[in-house]
Image (cartoon, helix red, strand yellow):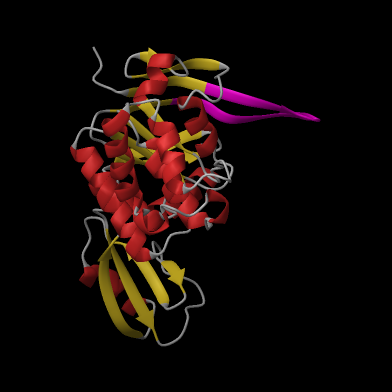
């Protein structure tokens, strides 16, 4: 029996449009276990939002199955176990932040217990200073934070977050990341779709790269980021890079793999390149995603 609290198997969704159709999600299989934070990344139009909406039960798949805590996605049991924070959330404009959370908390607990849920949600979203502000007056960043707070109400087992960490400044992003890590420590599984690769790199234990509706790469983050890269600063740009090197604004770079810095610099010398400085760094998640996209395009 699977330990997955969220499982998609061969999920496909096609949208009919004038003049044809678009397959937004194409045979995606993905599992999340309790306490796991998974980053879902890819270019615009990759199908990330569609996949989250399918998992949340907002959309139905054309093919494949989705279960949440063992129940079919969209069922009452699945909705109780799952919280979804969409991109561009909309809330009742006349209600304050506190009133909005209290309204949703009524579905989870009565009286004093409800007030405790609201207090915890305000803390998670860092919303204490705007608790009595009407939602119509919230900036995009505060609306995203309210969406996270609302999605986490009621002891959810799974959180689906669509660009929740976008439009927030660095201190707030760090606080939200810390809050999500505390939730994961209590066993909540988080699937985070984001273009903010720095936030994904900070949070995720595993990363899934989606391109044209398909999973093209999926691996634990430490595996993806263990590759060393040699950066070479040159006095003048090369007319063409030596074999294995890539041209950068400062000069060249190369994945070292099992090779050495000395061997890479020997190639530079053989091509009569004037090396000013070098630096060895580990790959960033941005490096991995761009490399994956380039390989997929070939």
Foreground: 15 or 187?
A: 187
Foreground: 197 or 157?
A: 157
In the depicted structure, whether residue 217 falls above or below residue 194: above
Residue 24 in magenta? yes
**Residue 251 in sight from this viewpoint:** yes
At x 39% / y 77%, what residue is drawn?
A: 271
User: Which residue appears farthest toward the right when viewing the image?
Assistant: 19
At x 40% / y 43%, what residue is drawn?
A: 148
- Looking at the rendering, in which quadrant would you find the N terminus? top left
Residue 235 in magenta? no
Foreground: 251 or 3?
A: 3
Q: Based on the displayed image, in which of its 4 quarters is residue 276 positioned? A: bottom left
Q: Is residue 21 left or right of residue 57?
A: right
At x 56% / y 41%, what residue is drawn?
A: 92
The segment highlighted magenta reads 12-28
Q: Position of residue 116 (x, y in %)?
A: 27, 38
Q: Based on the displayed image, in which of its 4 quarters is residue 69 positioned? A: top left
In the depicted structure, whether residue 148 falls above or below residue 271: above
Q: How many badges with numbers are in the image?
A: 0
User: Which residue appears farthest toward the front when viewing the image?
Assistant: 111
Q: Position of residue 134 (x, y in %)?
A: 52, 51
């Amino acid at each position: 029996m699977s330990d997955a609290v969220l499982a998609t198997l061969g999920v496909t969704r096609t949208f009919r449009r004038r003049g044809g159709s678009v397959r937004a999600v194409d045979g995606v299989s993905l599992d999340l276990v309790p306490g796991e934070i998974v980053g879902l990344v890819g270019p615009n139009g990759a199908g990330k939002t569609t996949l989250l909406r399918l998992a949340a039960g907002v959309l139905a798949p054309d093919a494949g199955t989705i279960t949440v805590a063992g129940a079919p996605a969209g069922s009452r049991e699945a909705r109780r176990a799952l919280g979804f924070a969409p991109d561009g959330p909309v809330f009742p404009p006349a209600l304050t932040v506190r009133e909005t959370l209290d309204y949703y908390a009524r579905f989870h607990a009565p009286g004093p217990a409800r007030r405790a849920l609201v207090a915890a949600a305000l803390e998670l979203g860092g919303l204490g200073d705007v608790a009595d502000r009407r939602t119509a007056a919230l900036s995009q960043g505060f609306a995203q934070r309210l969406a996270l707070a609302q999605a986490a109400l009621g002891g959810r087992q799974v959180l689906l977050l669509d660009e929740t960490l976008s439009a927030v400044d660095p201190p707030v992003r760090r606080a939200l990341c810390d809050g999500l890590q505390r939730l994961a420590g209590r066993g909540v599984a988080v699937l985070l779709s984001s273009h903010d690769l720095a936030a994904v790199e900070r949070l995720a234990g595993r990363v899934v790269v989606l391109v044209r509706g398909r999973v093209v790469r999926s691996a634990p983050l430490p595996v993806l980021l263990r590759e060393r890269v040699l950066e070479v600063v040159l006095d003048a740009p090369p007319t063409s890079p030596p074999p294995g090197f890539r041209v950068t604004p400062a000069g060249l770079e190369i994945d070292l793999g099992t090779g050495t810095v000395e061997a890479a610099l020997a190639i530079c010398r053989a091509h009569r390149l004037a090396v000013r400085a070098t630096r060895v760094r580990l790959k960033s998640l941005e490096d991995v995603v761009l490399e994956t996209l380039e390989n997929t395009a070939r």
